[in-house]
Image (cartoon, rainbow, N blue to C red):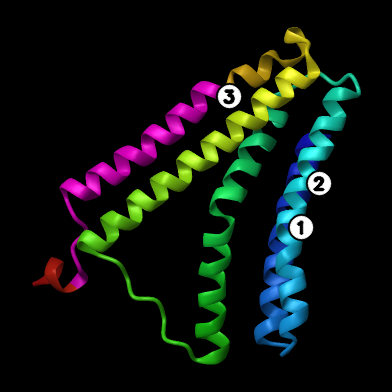
């Protein structure tokens, strides 16, 4: 059941974002667009409440519950960036705004480190949700599955930091420099 709710919340999250951008750029209704864009974070709150209610109602934690915590952490940490990316795409497509320049060199490495910081935030939020659920439920046998997500959070953060380190050492070349 929780897996279905996660999928429904993911669909609702993107429906709110795309609906907000469609209202803003295609329908010419910027206020409606803002309302729909603000609905996206509400989806995360709804998912968190549903997961907590399921566990507090006697449910045993599964990987789905841990996935919900991870999803919420990523959504909170990267949500604004994802919306800004989609907004820029819509502005380019429907308003003729210039496309964002492709980052290379130091600018790309800096962007990678900013992403590593966002990933750290996502991991911290996910860990706090997992820890909070474990404490609130107060039954180690029913929340054992959640404990298994802590090493996964470390792996996710490590991969993102290694990505940033690699582009700091070997900067991404521009297309001109790579072909020249």
Name the quadrant containing residue 40: bottom right
In the image, what residue occupies the spot 39% across and 76% down?
Answer: 100
Q: Which mark is residue 149?
A: 3
Q: Is residue 13 above or below residue 176?
A: above
Name the quadrant containing residue 116: top left
The residues bearing labels 3 and 2 have C-alpha atoms spaced at a distance of 21 Å
Nearer to us of marks 2 and 1 is 2
Q: Residue farthest to the left?
A: 180
Give SS at disc 3.
helix
Q: Quadrant of the C terminus?
A: bottom left
Q: Write the start and end of the magenta stretch as one range.
A: 150-175
- Secondary structure mainly formed by the magenta segment: helix
Q: Is residue 83 above or below residue 50?
A: below
Give SS at disc 1.
helix
Pick whichever of labels 3 and 2 is earlier in the sequence.
Answer: 2
> Which residue is disc 2 drawn over?
46
In the rendered image, residue 138, in percent from the top left (x then y), is placed at 78, 13
> Which residue is disc 1 drawn over?
12
**Along the viewing direction, whichever of 30 and 5 lies nearer the viewer:** 30
Q: Is residue 180 left or right of residue 174?
A: left
In the rendered image, residue 135, in percent from the top left (x then y), is placed at 73, 18
Q: Is residue 92 left or right of residue 108?
A: right
């Amino acid at each position: 059941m929780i897996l279905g709710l996660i999928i429904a919340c993911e669909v609702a999250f993107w429906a709110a974002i795309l609906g907000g951008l469609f209202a803003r750029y295609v329908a010419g209704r910027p206020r409606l667009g803002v309302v729909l864009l603000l609905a996206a974070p509400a989806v995360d709150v709804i998912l968190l409440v549903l997961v907590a209610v399921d566990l507090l109602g006697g449910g045993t934690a599964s990987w789905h519950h841990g996935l919900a915590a991870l999803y919420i952490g990523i959504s909170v940490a990267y949500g604004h960036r994802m919306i800004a990316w989609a907004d820029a795409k819509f502005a380019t497509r429907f308003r003729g705004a210039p496309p964002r320049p492709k980052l290379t060199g130091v600018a790309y490495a800096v962007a990678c480190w900013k992403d590593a910081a966002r990933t750290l935030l996502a991991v911290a939020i996910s860990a706090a949700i997992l820890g909070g659920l474990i404490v609130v439920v107060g039954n180690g046998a029913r929340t054992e599955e959640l404990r298994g997500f802590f090493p996964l959070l470390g792996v996710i953060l490590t991969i993102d930091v290694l990505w940033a380190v690699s582009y700091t050492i070997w900067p991404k070349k521009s297309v001109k420099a790579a072909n020249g």
